[in-house]
Image (cartoon, rainbow, N blue to C red):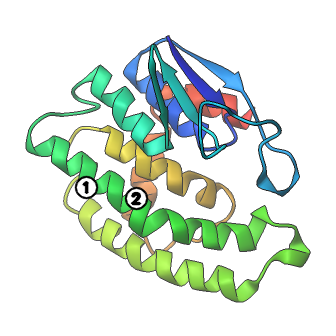
Amino acid sequence: MLRIHGIPRSRAFRCIWAAEEAGLPYEVVPIGFASGFKLERPLAINPNNKIPALEDGDLVLFESLAINLHIAKKAGAPLMPSGDDESRVLQWTLWTATEVEAHVLRWGYNTYLKPPAERVPAEASAGKEALDLRLAVLEGELAKRPFLLGEAFTIADLNLACVLYAARANGYDLARFPKVVAWIDACLDRPAARRARALREG
């Protein structure tokens, strides 16, 4: 059984959703946050002392996107396809990490995550400006196909949709990107996503 350390209202949500999509048994080992975005207690199996972390038998992993790639590989296609499409999954997952997430966080910290007195509107604007450039790229790609790789939903879609999920839920303006909106809706309306979201949103 997969053991996912974290709480649904954190990056562990991605791993919970991935486990649901994969149809693999899992348990969530709850560990949340104290003030200042610090863990409420040390997480010995992650040298970075961050969540999530995964135990899968003798294997211990940190980094949520790496965890998700591992879960998807256990499930196989269509969640993790083979051949050239596996490389495309890696491409979009790394794009999520390097081109998207930092800008989502820059906007988010200065819009809703930090206390109001600590928010810097110029930082929020800069984050949105940078993210909108990436969303324009995504809009163009999704004009060609319903999901990142084609007709089938893969772990690449899940990884990117998770990063954009909280921003959208907290008022990020996506009006310029109707294809992105339709794609997020399609991702988040999947049965596995709804089960994971019930844990996060409930």
Residue 186 visible within the image: no
**Relative horizontal placement of residue 182, taking residue 45 as reference (left or right):** left
Q: Is residue 67 visible?
A: yes
| N-term-proximal mark, 1 vs 2 | 1
Q: Residue at x 45, y 66 (%)?
A: 100
Seen at 30% across and 55% down, the residue is: 92
Number of the label disc, if any, that sits on residue 196: none
Residue at the (19%, 60%) spot, across then down? 144
- Residue 81: give x, y in percent of width and height: 19, 34
Q: Quadrant of residue 70?
A: top left
Relative side of 53 to 23, left or right:
right
For the residue carrying disc 1, how many other residues have a C-alpha within 10 Å: few (<14), some (14-19), or many (20+)? few
> Residue 202, relative to residue 188: is it above or below?
above
Look at mark 1 in the image and give the residue it sits on.
Answer: 91
Q: Nearer the viewer, residue 178 or 22?
A: 22
Locate the C terminus and report the quarter of the image it occupies: top right
Q: Residue 109: x percent and y percent?
A: 71, 68
Residue 24 rendering spot, x and y as whole percentages = 43, 15
* Residue farthest bottom in this picture: 122
Q: How many marks?
A: 2
Residue 168: % across, % down = 60, 59
Label 2's element?
helix
Instruction: Look at mark 2 in the image and give the residue it sits on.
Output: 96
User: Which quadrant of the view contains residue 11?
Assistant: top right
